[in-house]
Image (cartoon, rainbow, N blue to C red):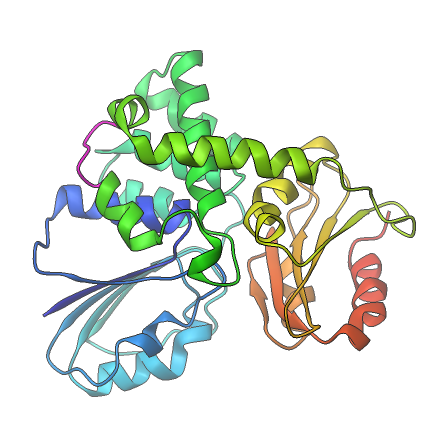
Amino acid sequence: MHYDVFNGDADGILALHQLRLHTPQPATTLITGVKRDIKLLNKIGEVEHSSITVLDISLDSNRDALLSLLEQNNTVTYIDHHFAGVIPESVKLITHIDPAPTTCTSLIVDKLLDGKYRAWAVAAAFGDNLHDSAQEAAKKISCSPEELTQLRELGELLNYNGYGAEIADLHFAPDKLYRALHLYDDPFVFLADSPDLATLRQGFEEDMALAMNQQEMASSKHNRIYSFPNTPWARRVSGVFSNLRAREKKDAAHALIVENDDTTLRISVRAPLNNRKNADTLCLSFPTGGGRAAAAGINNLPSEMLDDFLNQFHATFPS
């Protein structure tokens, strides 16, 4: 038995897509979820003597489940760009982990495959808001400006689909979107043919129109903070909206606050694009926080801790 475990955003989906174009696994079991559902190894359960590929989820957040799987004689290949902590030593574990703020899991896979499916990696980098890295990678495949724009749209739409509190918030479950996309070797054919992408494009435009009408909070000082209501559109658009605002003002940090059903708050943080540091440090200091240096979040911040978060946010990213 083989398991492919991957984040449900553009980076996770396209990292797996590249790997399976290169090395098909027709009998694989797919394990994924919404973007913030990162403790995915817990979903595998009690398995033995299986092979497992893990993509774009923090090793540190999955440490206990990983150790259990290794003890059960499973072999694990782990590819990621999030904070990992101490990497376990095991002959059954192969890791390719690079937390540099200018890379993503799909670019790591691209390097492992010598750029064989680079256009997909470029799209993933755009989806992860790594526009400079995407453009640099694209130079090696001679993309026209029009093709580069198309790859950017692909990455951003796939990333948009990953955001939500639960699968019901999304337009497509990530495993189903991956299976639909995996029928295509060429991203430009997928862009032209896929009805799923047309659905995402329409949803993105409608949700972003609502998001752009939301006002910045008055207390934001040098950085910018936004608050969205407890609605599916707000959860879906939170990532792409945060990325857009970060690109607009590259010296500022950005935070987006979205209400959860249980009165807790879902926080998205973007470090300044000109200094991609400490978003993970900030969010990890609060319960249910995680992420990477450039972009991180908190799944369920108690509302009474909001003032503490805002104070630490401004202290972490001074003007």
Q: Which secondary structure class fits the magenta region best?
A: loop
Q: For the magenta stretch, what is the residue range? A: 182-186
Residue 71 point in image, percent of width and height = 22, 87
Residue 155 point in image, percent of width and height = 43, 36
Q: Which residue is drawn at 14% across and 43% down?
A: 22
Q: Which of 279 and 241 is in front in this view?
A: 241
Q: Residue at x 31, y 75 (%)?
A: 43
**Residue 39 on the magenta segment:** no
Image position of 205 with respect to 182: above or below: above
Image position of 252 with respect to 69: above or below: above
Residue 319 point in image, percent of width and height = 86, 47
**Would residue 21 be seen by someone viewing this image from the given angle?**
yes
Residue 2 point in image, percent of width and height = 13, 66
**Would residue 103 be seen by someone viewing this image from the given angle?**
no
**Is residue 81 toward the left or the right of residue 253 in the image?**
left
Image position of 104 with respect to 137: above or below: below
Label tally: 0
Q: Nearer the viewer, residue 80 or 264?
A: 264
Image position of 212 with respect to 151: above or below: below
**Is residue 35 toward the left or the right of residue 18 in the image?**
right
